[in-house]
Amino acid sequence: MGGLTRSSRRRLAALGVLAAMSAFAVGLVFLRFALSGGTQYANLLWNLVLAWVPLLLALFVYDRHRRGASRASLVLPLVLWLAFLPNAPYLVTEFGLLRVIEDMPVWFDVALLATFAWTGLMLGFVSVYLVQAVARRLAGPAAGWACALGALGATGVGIYLGRYLRWNSWDLLVQPAAVLRETAARFDSPQLIGMSLVMAAFLTVAYTMLYVVLDAALDAQND
């Protein structure tokens, strides 16, 4: 560890915390399996895997940019990142399972779902933070914030597409015309507008709070 730079140590610490939180979430699911005798909430395990994808793509983009990669070479991984980004905060919507699954005490399921939701939010926000840093270095602070806020706004729509229309991220890549056509057909849907706006607003406020706190903490360390 002595040979690692300060930024490398921070990265390892951040990834370690996220991995530990993910492991705790997975442990809660398997504990639930053992206590309830069923496999309810098993879908959360796959959703957590998908929530890691945008972070891994953002790390790839961030590292490629730091090594001097051309802007053109970053386009494809950034498109993939944006397509998979909704999978991370999507875990927040799993609280709806509380209405239909009642084979365990509600406090246990609330703790389980909150763990997955928090982990998903952090995975998504860290990925946005990394991409915002790249955009800021390429085109300035305003472009960085435009990139972050635009991605969070699009994520609000993406969460709706996944929750209610059951589209997946790869569907947007494999059959984009079908996804866009169905979205356009529901463009005046109060459900689409309401959920997209509320989720986008929630994600924007939460991310901005995290960004400001993190920025202040880093400044305090540098004093």
Image (cartoon, rainbow, N blue to C red):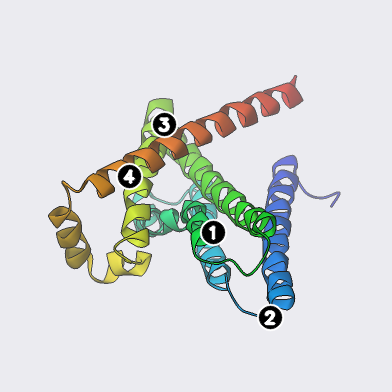
129 or 116, nearer to the observer: 116
Give the residue pinned by disc 4.
196
Instruction: Report how far apart the C-alphas of labels 1 and 4 lie in the structure.
Output: 22 Å
Q: Which residue is mark 1?
A: 98
N-terminal-most mark, 3 or 1:
1
Specify which label sits upstream in the sequence, 2 or 3: 2
In this view, the residue farthest toward the bottom is: 37
- Which residue is tagged 2? 37
Q: Is residue 127 visible?
A: yes
| Nearest to N terminus: mark 4 or mark 2 | 2
Judged by depth in the image, the label closer to the viewer, 4 or 2, is 2
Closer to the chain start, of discs 2 and 1, is 2
**Exactly how many numbered labels are in the figure?**
4
Q: Nearer the viewer, mark 3 or mark 4?
A: 4
Q: Amino acid at mark 1?
A: Leu
- Of the image marks 3 and 4, the number of the one nearer the N terminus: 3
